[in-house]
Amino acid sequence: MKLITVAGPPSSGKTSVILKTIAALGLPKRSVGVVKFDSLTSFDNVRYSENDVPVQTGFAGKICPDHFFVTNIEGAMKWGRKKNLSMLITESAGLCNRCSPYIRGILSVCVIDNLSGVNTPRKIGPMLKYADIVVVTKGDIVSQAEREVFAFNIKEVNSNAKVIFVNGITGQGTFALAKYFSEVPEVDTLKDRTLRFTMPAAICSYCTGETRIGDYYQLGMLKKMEYGD
Amino acid sequence: MSSDTCAYDYYGEVMSTPLYLLLEKYPLSADYLANHRLNNIDKSKPLLSALTEADIDALEEFGLDAESLVLHFCKFLEAFTRSHTCDFGTIHSVTIIGGIDKSGAAENVSLTLHPGEIVSIVGPTGSGKSRLLEDIECMAQKDTPTMRQILINGVVPDDERRFETGGKLVAQLSQTMNFVMDLTVREFLEMHAKSRMVSNVEAVVERSFICANSLAGEKFTPDTKVTQLSGGQSRALMIADTALMSASPIILIDEIENAGIDRKEAIKLLSGNEKIILMSTHDPLLALRADKRIVIKNGGISKILVTSDEERESLEEIEKVDRVLLNLRNSLRRGDVITKDSVCGIKED
């Protein structure tokens, strides 16, 4: 199974980008699934279900959303395998801009929108800086100059990233994104892989700088998701 | 990765040169320092020595230590000095080789476009105009739903060119675009010029400003906020900026008919800057000014018309009709009462 992690600020267009990219991938129905990591509420599961995309939603609640992500990502993989998915996409809302739910060796995508101001790329932090691909949405409603300056500011923060402009309504631009998604290698397990960036200090083992994945490393305040069928 | 090895090209220089000299040589370095909250480090020393005195906590927050920051900075210099010089190369032609329409029927067309050429795209809403643009933008190789193929300079573009150019092939202008930044016209143009790394920022900004004003119906000053410009002024600024500053060799114009700008001059400006212009429009004044027009039907190119002499001649008549409407608009603006004479076009300004 292929695994891709997608992160981005709330309402930046993550769900639309993922749905249009799944369509552009042209894989058999129900072979690409999504696990949505959110903090309190989410309505995206409805949109995925409407598009016949298998989906699971987990709410971090009082747990830091990215800590929640890393403690549940293996469970997500297990669910994906049980559903016989050929590709699993995780979607997480980056809420404090401090963290990035990115794992070394796993394609990491950051979605940000042009409307948030040209200097936003310089403020976002690890979520943008450690991404392999930065998807820019809502480019159809700002000037060409602002699009170009926005892309330039992304490059200033993350010069290795590929910047792809995607129109979440028409799907324009998802062709290139789908190509990168389909080229991702298969992964069996995430155990012992590491995060690209440490989490902030708080109260669980990841809060204290742990980056390894696996039950053995998870101490303190943890929250495990219930995966349905 | 080649970028990792290339970064070492700058390593020696970064290690031995005092920061203030690096800042002079590579002005963008200031942004790099600001992005890492390092604006206040000692610039009389090379980066590494300055960093050892800096607040290490701040570095840690960015996931970097002093040594890795130096390397990261070298990569930054590499990315901005080399990749930008080979933006897109020169484009002599773009060829669209037909695929299939929504019902699977072959398009049977091949169209080659050259810089300076203007092509309009006509067809009902939802007929596939955006799809055609997207095929051009991603340089389709019979791998999109339309099965079209795009050649650049007569050949199949390699994968690197196809996927690494970050959407730079096509610049877009449309009625629905707005400025979202709270900057003056001058600041706006300067910021764009800086990101394009042009050598003479002031001259380019000045030229773009004059150009924008010549297209706009109502004049504006360089100190006007871009968000306060009228619809027509905004469009004029966007067109001048795209023509003179955008890196993209192809410009797509989507429905700019009633924008309150000099459309004839705008088109002339864009095509005069060696851009390939694609206009999605139903405005006869614009459509007939193009050299060719692509007719889209049922998701496919149903035909390509070359603007005939008769059509060009009728353009004059259409301009007369247009002038009548323009005069009527101006009369209304002045508070005049509209008479039958003014509708017939007798009372021209």
Image: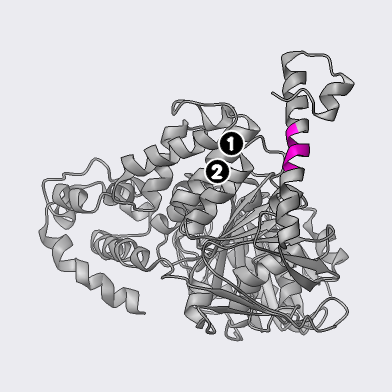
B213 to the left or right of B309: left
In the image shown, does B102 or B208 lie closer to the viewer? Answer: B208
Question: Hey, what amino acid is under mark 1?
Answer: Ser
In the image shown, does B323 or A25 lie closer to the viewer? Answer: B323
| Local SS, label 1 | helix
- Horizontal and vertical percent for residue A139? 62, 52
B310 to the left or right of A178: right
Residue A144 in view of the camera: no
- Residue B345 belongs to magenta span: no
Residue B332 in view of the camera: yes
Q: What stretch is highlighted in magenta?
A: B318-323
Tell me the crowding category of disc 2: few under 14, some 14 to 19, or many 20 or more residues within 10 angstroms, Cα based: many
Q: Which mark is residue B238?
A: 2
Question: Hey, what amino acid is under mark 2?
Answer: Met
Question: Residue visible at 76% across and 13% down?
Answer: B335
- Horizontal and vertical percent for residue B72? 31, 63
Q: Which chain carries label 1?
A: B
Q: Which mark is residue B234?
A: 1
Question: Residue visible at 11% across and 50% down?
Answer: B45
